[in-house]
Image (cartoon, rainbow, N blue to C red):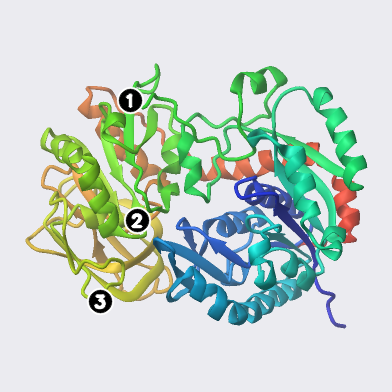
């Protein structure tokens, strides 16, 4: 007997950054809790914050996070097309996890989208054959008139998937009623009919004061508001868009729902990871958090979620630094990944941040570079093929004796291994993470490589290990290609204890279990959204029943 295709539900937004990704993750976890086999899907994602699947392919981080919420391994079918902006009006097009080519916006739209349509449909069909429910996330707004004729991410996709649509609006940015009414007015009649309900996201305040507006909205559009979702702070879940860094701060994640009093005290925001600055731009360290970590906010920052576990640490303040005025007096500085290392390095130079970093390192400050940041710490960047930059050679910061040469082949791999963050001979720590880079880095003189890694796909090959990274003789400057390095609890605590020792503070023995925090965050998110959405109505929309799933 042929298995029926999976039911589908699609979340579209009145704009970008209204909370679609996190709401999609919430619904994925709810359906999983209710016994269904569920998978996420986003046909085309645009983000430099990516995720490596178990088979070494690259997709949008949001879909990797959503797969985790479903309790399933991520695959490229969940995000078959990923656009990674690299230069002005240009992006690297990643198809089923592998780089296709760099295309400008016009070429992509006019020449590639017709091919992309078939790729998207095939991926969706495979997911629908394998799962009970597929939760689909749209992109931007379905009312982008100039893009609708070749749309593969919103209403045309909803039609291909035969998916009822929930339209998500962000009340925190203002104009929520106008955004909903305006979006629906700009849709074609058949598209408007596909929208089955409205979700008001990022709400704070007194719902009774909002109710008259909700009543008016339902009368005006003839569609139900299926939920008003309040702001939920303290979730240890990844952001996708670097716009979220505008207010990043760390706070110990809450494990229980907020009371009304707590919610009022938290102020504005939305259902998204709570990552806003707890120290001022000048680096004031709040009581109880003696460690001040500054992360350089690069214009083309990528995989910024590498630092997320630091936000959960009880003794650590994390700040994103965009200018010399933000520098303060950090205990450590992190140079994160970049989609265009040479151009971002030129920005550091022009902004004065490179000079600040060099002076900090000369005074004995601790600096960590991850991927692109690691490449910047070397003496020279060579790009003879113009892979990332128009400059054939760019002088590095010179903190480590390294040269990086960029090439068109891209390494994407999940890896495991060991790390030694001290001078050679120190204790080795088990680590895991992933690599995504197009550069190859070599040492220009003998230097300690603090990591020894191998692909997860070759666990039984004895000689598959390779050295990774470089470290200064005193152990205070080091870099690595290992994304997710701070997701390793023991390593993270060991490094933070080095910072504590620098300040004459005793070590903290128990590392924070970030994996457990993250798993609890999925359940907290699902419980919160379940309380504030009409799930019975949503189940009726997709033709399923609460608690009648058959997940194994």
Q: Quadrant of residue 194?
A: bottom right
Compared to residue 433, the image places residue 523 above or below, namely: above
Task: Report how far apart the C-alphas of labels 2 and 1 lie in the structure.
Answer: 24 Å
Q: Is residue 302 left or right of residue 532?
A: left
Residue carrying label 3: 385
Q: Is residue 190 left or right of residue 266?
A: right
Which of disc 3 and disc 1 is earlier in sequence?
1
Q: Percent x, y for residue 193? A: 87, 60
Q: Say which element carries label 1.
A: loop
Residue carrying label 2: 338
Q: Percent x, y for residue 393? A: 16, 66
Q: Can residue 240 be seen by looking at this rendering?
A: yes
Q: Residue at x 84, y 58 (%)?
A: 192
Is there CB contact under 8 Å for labels 2 and 1? no
How crowded pointer 3 is (Cα within 10 Å; few <14, some 14-19, many 20+) is rated as some
Q: Say which element carries label 2.
A: strand
Residue carrying label 1: 283
Task: Report how far apart the C-alphas of labels 1 and 3 lie in the structure.
Answer: 41 Å
How crowded pointer 2 is (Cα within 10 Å; few <14, some 14-19, many 20+) is rated as many
Which of disc 2 and disc 3 is earlier in sequence?
2
Is there CB contact under 8 Å for labels 1 and 3? no
Q: Residue at x 86, y 65 (%)?
A: 190
Q: Percent x, y for residue 145? A: 68, 62
Task: Give the residue furthest to the left.
Answer: 445
Quarter placement of the N terminus: bottom right
Q: Residue at x 23, y 52 (%)?
A: 346
Disc tally is 3
Task: Report how far apart the C-alphas of labels 3 and 2 lie in the structure.
Answer: 18 Å
Q: Nearer the viewer, residue 11 or 458?
A: 11
Q: Can residue 547 be seen by looking at this rendering?
A: no
Which of disc 1 and disc 2 is earlier in sequence?
1
């Amino acid at each position: 007997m042929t298995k029926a295709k999976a039911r589908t539900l699609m979340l579209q937004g009145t704009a970008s950054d209204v909370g679609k990704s996190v709401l999609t993750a919430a619904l994925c976890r709810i359906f999983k809790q209710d016994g269904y086999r569920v998978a996420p899907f986003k046909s085309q994602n645009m983000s430099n914050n990516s995720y490596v699947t178990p088979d070494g392919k690259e997709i949008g981080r949001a879909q990797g996070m959503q797969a985790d919420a479903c309790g399933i391994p991520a695959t490229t079918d969940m995000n078959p097309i990923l656009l990674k902006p690299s230069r002005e009006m240009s992006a690297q097009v990643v198809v089923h996890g592998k780089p296709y080519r760099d295309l400008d916006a016009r070429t992509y739209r006019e020449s590639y989208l017709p091919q992309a349509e078939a790729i998207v449909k095939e991926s969706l069909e495979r997911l629908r054959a394998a799962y009970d429910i597929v939760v689909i996330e749209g992109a931007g707004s379905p009312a982008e008139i100039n893009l609708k004729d070749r749309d593969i991410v919103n209403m045309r996709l909803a039609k291909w998937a035969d998916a009822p649509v929930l339209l998500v609006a962000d009340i925190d940015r203002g104009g929520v009623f106008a955004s909903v009414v305006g979006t629906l007015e700009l849709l074609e009649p058949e598209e408007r009919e596909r929208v089955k309900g409205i979700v008001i996201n990022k709400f704070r305040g007194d719902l009774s004061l909002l109710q008259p507006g909700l009543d008016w909205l339902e009368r005006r559009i003839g569609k139900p508001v299926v939920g008003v979702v309040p702001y939920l702070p303290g979730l240890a879940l990844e952001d996708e868009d670097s716009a979220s860094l505008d207010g990043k701060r760390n706070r110990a994640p809450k494990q229980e729902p907020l009371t009304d009093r707590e919610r009022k005290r938290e102020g504005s925001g939305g259902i998204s990871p709570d990552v806003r600055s707890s120290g001022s731009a000048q680096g004031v360290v709040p009581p109880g958090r003696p460690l001040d970590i500054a992360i350089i906010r690069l214009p083309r920052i990528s995989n910024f979620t590498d630092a997320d576990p630091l936000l959960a640490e009880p003794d650590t303040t994390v700040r994103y630094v965009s200018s010399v005025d933000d520098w303060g007096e950090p205990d450590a500085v992190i140079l994160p990944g970049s989609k265009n290392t040479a151009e971002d390095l030129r920005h550091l130079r022009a902004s004065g941040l490179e000079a600040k970093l060099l002076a900090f390192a000369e005074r004995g400050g601790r600096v960590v570079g991850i991927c692109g940041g690691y490449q910047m710490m070397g003496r020279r960047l060579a790009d003879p093929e113009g892979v990332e930059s128009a400059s054939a050679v760019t002088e590095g910061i010179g903190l480590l004796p390294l040269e990086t040469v960029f090439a068109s082949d891209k390494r994407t791999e999940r890896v495991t291994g060991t790390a030694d963050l001290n001078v050679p001979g120190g204790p080795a720590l088990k680590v895991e993470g992933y690599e995504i880079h197009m550069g190859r880095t070599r040492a220009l003189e003998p230097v300690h490589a603090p990591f020894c890694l191998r692909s997860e796909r070759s666990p039984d090959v004895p000689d598959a290990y390779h050295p990774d990274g470089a470290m200064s003789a005193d152990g205070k400057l080091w870099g690595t290609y290992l994304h997710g390095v701070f997701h390793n609890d023991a390593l993270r605590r060991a490094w933070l204890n080095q910072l504590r020792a620098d300040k004459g503070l005793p070590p903290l023995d128990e590392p924070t279990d970030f994996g457990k925090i993250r798993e609890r965050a999925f359940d907290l998110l699902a419980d919160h959204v379940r309380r504030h959405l009409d799930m019975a109505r949503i189940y009726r929309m997709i033709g399923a029943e609460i608690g009648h799933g058959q997940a194994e």
